[in-house]
Image (cartoon, coloured by chain):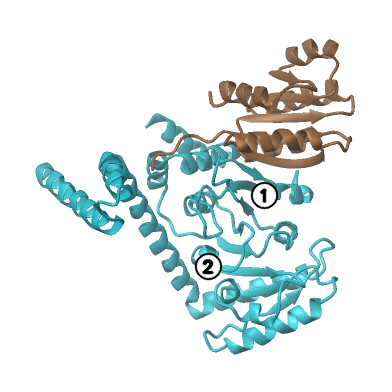
Chain colours: A brown, B cyan
Amino acid sequence: MAEQRKIRVLVAKPGLDGHDRGAKVVARALRDAGMEVIYTGLRQTPEQIVEAAIQEDVDVVGLSCLSGAHNHLFPRVVELLKAKDAADILVVGGGVIPEDDIPFLKESGVKEIFTPGTSTGDVVNFIRSHAGSK
Amino acid sequence: MQAVNNLLERLEARDIRALARAISLVEDSEEGASELLASLSPRLSGSRIIGITGPPGSGKSTLTSKLARDFLDRGEKVGLLLIDPSSPFSGGAILGDRIRMQELSGRDGIYIRSLGSRGSVGGLSQATARVLRLLEHFGFSVIIIETVGTGQAETDVVETVDSVVVVAVPGLGDDIQAMKAGIMEIADVFVVNKADKDGADRTLRQIEAALQMQEGQGMHKVPVLATVASSGQGVTELVAALDAHYKYLADSGELQRRRERRLRKELIGYVTSVLMSDFFARSQADVDAKLADIIQGRTDVYTVGRFLSRKYINERVERDAKQD
């Protein structure tokens, strides 16, 4: 049977906060939307995240951060992906992220930021419409 | 095709991104897969392939991680395939084995890939054989496949790898469970993990007793080892047992037999899937039409099945005759 290309997403929590409920809810929603979600869990360094993203050939990296360190961690992941010639992998982020920080994060190459209250359907739709252009 | 040639070149240059991309290609598409795999040089595999299987939560991932670490430490190049179940409803999956592989991150000489089972029910994924082919071509000296969490009958791994490690844990059943057919029969090395838990000794004895009853099938005596994967206890012994088993395979000629079995399975699997795709592509309308008759009670599955398969074969023969 002819199969279609499966969207693969890495869901990771960079940095030191231990709150992974949001990341798990998103992972579950992506699973139910038919995607393969590589879940790497808590306390990942940007280097670990990028290594996993490349080995797993993901279309999207979803970062969740509730520690306030997003302005450092998210752009670092984008930068490292670029350095590894993997800038085609989409980076999106979520968590408690102040409105004021969003323009900076987007300028740094994070494609979209999902703040608290976003429906999982919106996340799914965004990934469906932006992934798979590789 | 340009894309495939480009990928081949990068694979030859040992580019990890190319390997990762090639794996996705052989997972996602039949045509792309056969085109790419047929372009690889047909050299025999120099990789040693180990399968780790056992029930969900038995510690397969942690054990796999420790094994990989020990093989890396002695200079092997290690490829890991971690298989988790895909949803039968959405086709999606949560691939979470990598969580246990943290201590391997940043190390050279290792490649880790998570695979969804994608409809396969034998404990492996639908494309495992093809993915293995790529890893072998890439030159990993040791490849470890961790199956989905298995129950009693998911035994595909035995036809795919050189050595099978079955991981058991204390407290999952009595001595009759240990005597049952299926998973219990396929071990080349048995591990009772979480051996620091109550009942571990009993589990060890039950497995040993069950194995004694099935001795005589081969010259290799299946060792039963106690491990605590989280602390690394018993891992050195497990590596030694695997080395001993591999030596037995090579010395006895069993390695050749196992590889032949695997190639046979891969070949038949490929032909079956090509035929199935062709059948579905050509007979979809027939199937739909006849299904209505079956549901109405006018005919039955087996009469229709015989008719459709004969019709398909006859049409196929006519088509091929015209082409000749």
Who is closer to the viewer here, A28 or B144?
Answer: A28
Query: Which residue is pictured at 78% across the width and 16% down the height?
Result: A105
**Closer to the camera: disc 1 or disc 2?**
2
Closer to the chain start, of discs 1 and 2, is 1
Amino acid bearing label 2: Val
Query: Which residue is pictured at 65% across the width and 81% down the height?
Result: B176
Please tell me whether residue B214 is drawn above or below residue B45 in the rendered image. below
Classify mark 1: helix, strand or loop.
loop
Q: Quadrant of the C terminus of chain B?
A: top left
Q: Which mark is residue B109?
A: 1
- Residue B112 in percent (x, y) is at 65, 48
In the picture provided, is B12 more to the left or to the right than A24? left
Classify mark 2: helix, strand or loop.
helix
In the picture provided, is B201 more to the left or to the right than B308? right
Please tell me whether residue A24 is drawn above or below residue B273 in the rendered image. above
Q: CA distance from mark 1 to mark 2?
A: 26 Å
Please state the total of marks drawn on the protein image. 2
- Residue A110 in percent (x, y) is at 72, 19
Question: According to the image, label 2 marks what residue?
Answer: B158
Q: Mark 1 near mark 2, Cβ–Cβ under 8 Å?
A: no
Query: Which residue is pictured at 54% across the width and 27% down the height?
Result: A132
Who is closer to the viewer here, B249 or B81?
Answer: B81
